[in-house]
Image (spheres, rainbow, N blue to C red):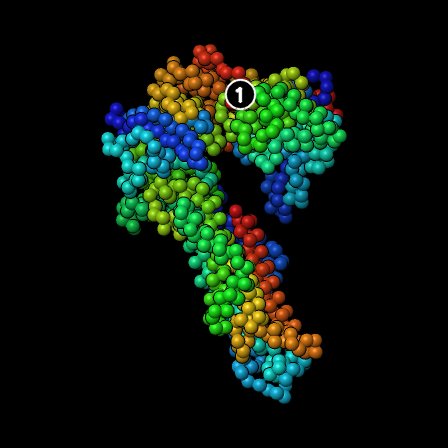
């Protein structure tokens, strides 16, 4: 790789609270996602994976109770604390899709109006006709059978799978360079979830979009990602290609996670502690997964 | 082992509202053996939740009948049936009253069904908490400080307090983290064996089914698609829909991937198309 | 007893709520106002300079005196100490508020719980009755009732109570509808618990934050309503000291004897403000708790 990664996070620390009652959420997170790459950040609830994504999106409200240090670089834009600065400057070049598509869409407006708004955030002077033409094309691209009808629907009139695709179409309408997907489709059925992942994978391949997948589901990660970061209690514990990680996990935490997952090939459940001090061992980086050298 | 605890004969449920008829469950006939863990599998809209509600007596069927220990289950349940058939819910955050102590929640069934002497009930609560792996001093606590896994253990203790014969487990681990899920599943398995319980395990997770169930029944759009022992179903699924479901499971090992791909090859996945 | 071994204690939310309440200067100010007024009312016989001025006595030598050294807030048209009468006015107002709310709240809460949990025709019947009461402007309703009845203290409280319970019914109905969807209610049902247990032991404890907040806010509003009624001559009759009648009576002498109506009006303002501040503080505290 000769180009700078689309997203680089270095030594990110985050704490909430004030007056000495600080609770540390992130203890030095580093990760990078290159163009056309599908990278997963996997961890349990409360591990800090979602908050990392929100910092990278500039969605975390900056306040006196939020203390962030480190570096988040998106395509050359440096924003130490995320926040409004990165949110403003990243514009439409970063998009995010959420866990529950139905709640992310506004129930009181038709899809058409919401789609126009999304497109106009990039090009304020877009005509209605041109916006609708692009919206229909975007919906067709995510395999929505009757785009014109979908545009005239409200979110609640569409199925979960359809809403998820509408969300993805909106997220991708302005051709973002980076797509952050936070547990996409977890609220949906497995077959729909599989379709969602396939769609995201196709877009990375055909458009060179960098995708950061946030998930707790190692199965989903294995299906989707090229490279995986495992996060545990605000610390990275393992970084490997997907092949390396699932063939030979090296960190005790990753090993525990993988053996705790029930398998469709049988074998029952292992006897495991819920927590072990071994899980706190330092980061293990597999061969070929180092930090990109050219970052200044 | 083969003595049936619950039989469903032509069971059906149709909802009617404002002239719309929705068939939630249609013509389901199944027999559940005592002591087994019977998985009910399906996606949203499959009717698996309706089935659970019918068995629990939360709604009445519109067709067919249910027999519990060879006796017809009435639509309006008496205390005896309420006690014998228990529920563990999906969301452990809402299943415990935030303004009552853990002890009060676990004790409720003891008071309702007048189990033991009233002075012996506190000791029984402590016993039940220990049985699910919690310290007895949790009885005085509010559920607010507890993790999802701990709350689910309390909910299990509450169901156990009824000394039930059948427990409906409605996605009991889908809101939990992987490591916690493994431990809760282990606990459920141990309790089933030790207490001779029968489980109706509602889930969408086929890997969990493989790990814990003895039989599986697959539902699609309110109909029973396939039913049988768990090994048989994973070795040679008969219905296309079952193959589709197994084919869509995200897996973590090579062995699983081979099994899944072999099953998937039997029934090609439908293209991402209309109606999803 | 087993040693407290596991992490995370159970009573933290309560201390969080207390911290939120006392961390807010406005709530503390409200609490201070309320405390002073309650203490003054309870110990009025000892804390007022002329407790005998409550009754129908006159001191024509001291009529309509502006505030001075002897009468800090001046005297009324009968020569009675205004400060004393305001304190006794507070006493009466508080008694009214407590009586009204201690009847209206339980009635409204039970109606709301039953309608919200039972649903169906019970819900329909109870809530339509409630809506009828809510549709009539409160003061108009109270005035209509008072039109039929003698303007006495008892009837005044009755009129206010009649228009107050529907607000609790509506509030608790909404809370109950939401709580009934919670898993713990389903759990109690599947365990076989009685409806009474579910309503009063499971759902009601979760209504307390809403009830307490509303009651605190309402003490102020009930006082205001009672004052409005007596301002219109439909409430308590002389010589009983009532803040509303004092404002009405004094208004006739504006602006020369301004103190006659201004002090009682400010007194109403202060008590309503005090209870409102406490109510708002409670609401925020309960939000911090959950």
Write down the quadrant of residue A207 in the picture: top right
Write down the quadrant of residue B9 in the picture: top left
* Chain where mark 1 sits: B
What residue is shown at x 47% (from left), y 62% (from top)?
C162
Residue A97: give x, y in percent of width and height. Answer: 61, 29
- The number of callouts visible is 1
Position of B196 with respect to B91 (left or right) is left
Q: Relative to C268, does residue B159 appear above or below in the rendering?
A: above
Write down the quadrant of residue A12 in the picture: top right
Residue B214: give x, y in percent of width and height. Answer: 34, 23
Secondary structure at badge 1 equals: loop
Residue C129: give x, y in percent of width and height. Answer: 45, 54
Residue C261: give x, y in percent of width and height. Answer: 64, 74
Q: Which residue is mark 1?
A: B274
Please state which of residues A133 and B49 is positioned toward the viewer in this rendering.
A133
What residue is shown at x 45% (from left), y 20% (from top)?
B245
The reply to whether residue A59 is in sight is yes
The reply to whether residue A69 is in sight is no
Please state which of residues A278 and B136 is positioned toward the viewer in this rendering.
B136
Please state which of residues C206 and A78 is positioned toward the viewer in this rendering.
C206
What residue is shown at x 46% (from left), y 17% (from top)?
B244
Please state which of residues C63 and B172 is positioned toward the viewer in this rendering.
C63
Q: Residues within 10 Å of mark 1 (few under 14, many from 20)?
A: few
What residue is shown at x 46% (from left), y 60% (from top)?
C104
């Amino acid at each position: 790789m000769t180009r700078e990664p689309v997203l680089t996070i270095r030594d990110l620390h985050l704490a909430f609270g004030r007056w000495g009652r600080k609770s540390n959420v992130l203890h030095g997170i580093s990760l990078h996602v290159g163009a056309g790459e599908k990278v997963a950040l996997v961890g349990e609830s409360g591990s800090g994976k979602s908050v990392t994504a929100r910092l990278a999106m500039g969605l975390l409200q900056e306040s006196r109770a939020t203390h962030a240090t480190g570096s988040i670089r998106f395509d050359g834009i440096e924003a130490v604390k995320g926040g409004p600065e990165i949110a403003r400057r990243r514009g439409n070049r970063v998009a995010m899709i959420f866990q529950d598509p139905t709640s992310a869409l506004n129930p009181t407006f038709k899809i058409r109006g919401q789609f126009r708004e999304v497109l106009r955030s990039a090009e304020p002077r877009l005509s209605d006709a041109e916006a609708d033409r692009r919206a229909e094309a975007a919906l067709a691209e995510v395999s929505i059978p009757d785009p014109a009808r979908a545009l005239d629907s409200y979110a609640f009139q569409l199925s979960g799978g359809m809403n998820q695709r509408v969300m993805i179409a909106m997220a991708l309408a302005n051709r973002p360079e980076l797509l952050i997907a936070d547990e996409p489709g977890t609220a949906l059925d497995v077959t729909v979830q599989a379709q969602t992942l396939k769609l995201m994978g196709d877009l990375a391949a055909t458009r060179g979009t960098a995708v950061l997948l946030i998930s707790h589901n190692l199965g989903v990660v294995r299906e989707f990602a090229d490279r995986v970061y495992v996060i545990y209690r605000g610390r990275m514990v393992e970084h490997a290609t997907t092949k390396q990680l699932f063939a030979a996990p090296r960190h005790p935490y990753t090993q525990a996670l993988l053996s705790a997952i029930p398998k469709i090939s049988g074998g029952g459940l292992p006897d495991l502690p819920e927590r072990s001090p071994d899980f706190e061992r330092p980061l293990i980086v597999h061969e070929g997964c180092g930090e990109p050298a050219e970052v200044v | 082992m083969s003595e049936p605890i619950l039989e469903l004969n032509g069971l059906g449920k149709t909802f009617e509202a404002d002239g719309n008829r929705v068939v939630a469950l249609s013509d389901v006939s199944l027999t559940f053996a005592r002591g087994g863990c019977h998985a009910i599998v399906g996606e949203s809209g499959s009717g698996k939740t309706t089935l659970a509600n019918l068995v629990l007596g939360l709604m009445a069927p519109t067709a067919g009948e249910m027999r519990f220990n060879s006796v017809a289950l009435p639509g309006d349940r008496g205390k005896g049936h309420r006690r014998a058939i228990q529920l563990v819910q999906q969301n452990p955050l809402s299943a415990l009253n935030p303004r009552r102590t853990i002890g009060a929640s676990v004790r409720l069934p003891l008071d309702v069904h007048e189990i033991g002497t009233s002075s012996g009930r506190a000791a029984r609560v402590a016993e039940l908490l220990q049985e699910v792996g919690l310290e007895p001093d949790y009885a005085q606590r509010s559920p607010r400080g507890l993790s999802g896994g701990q709350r689910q253990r309390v909910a299990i203790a509450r169901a156990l307090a009824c000394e039930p014969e059948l427990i409906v487990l409605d996605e009991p681990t889908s809101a939990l983290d992987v490591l916690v899920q493994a431990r809760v599943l282990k606990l459920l398995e141990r309790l089933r064996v030790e207490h001779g319980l029968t489980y109706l395990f509602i889930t969408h997770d086929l890997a969990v089914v493989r790990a814990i169930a003895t039989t599986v029944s697959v539902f699609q759009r309110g109909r029973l698609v396939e039913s049988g022992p768990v090994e048989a179903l994973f070795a040679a699924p008969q219905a296309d829909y079952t193959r589709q479901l197994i084919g869509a499971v995200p897996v973590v090992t090579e062995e699983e991937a081979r099994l899944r791909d072999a099953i998937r090859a039997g029934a090609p996945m439908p293209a991402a198309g209309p109606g999803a | 007893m087993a040693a407290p071994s596991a992490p995370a204690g159970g009573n933290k939310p309560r201390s969080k709520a207390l911290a939120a309440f006392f961390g807010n200067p406005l709530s503390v100010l409200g609490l201070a106002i309320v405390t002073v007024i309650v203490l003054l009312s309870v110990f009025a016989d000892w804390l007022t300079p002329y407790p005998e001025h409550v009754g129908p006595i006159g001191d024509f030598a001291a009529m309509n005196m502006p505030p001075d050294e002897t009468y800090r807030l001046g005297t009324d048209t009968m020569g009675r100490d205004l400060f004393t009468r305001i304190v006794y006015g507070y006493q009466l107002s508080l008694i009214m508020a407590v009586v009204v709310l201690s009847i209206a709240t339980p009635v409204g809460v039970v109606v709301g719980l039953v309608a919200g949990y039972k649903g169906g025709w019970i819900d329909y019947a109870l809530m339509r009755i409630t809506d009828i009461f809510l549709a009539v402007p409160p003061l108009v309703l109270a005035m209509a009732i008072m039109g039929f009845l003698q303007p006495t203290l008892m009837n005044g409280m009755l009129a206010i109570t009649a228009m107050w319970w529907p607000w609790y019914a509506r509030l608790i109905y909404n809370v109950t509808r939401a709580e009934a969807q919670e898993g713990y209610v389903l759990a109690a049902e599947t365990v076989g618990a009685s409806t009474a247990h579910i309503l009063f032991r499971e759902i009601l404890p979760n209504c307390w934050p809403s009830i307490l907040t509303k009651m605190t806010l309402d003490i102020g509003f009930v006082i205001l309503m009672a004052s409005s009624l007596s301002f219109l001559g439909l409430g308590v009759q002389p010589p009983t000291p009532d803040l509303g009648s004092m404002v009405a009576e004094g208004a006739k002498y504006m602006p020369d004897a301004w103190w006659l109506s201004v002090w009682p009006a400010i007194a109403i303002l202060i008590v309503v403000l005090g209870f409102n501040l406490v109510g708002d503080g409670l609401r925020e505290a309960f939000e911090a708790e959950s």
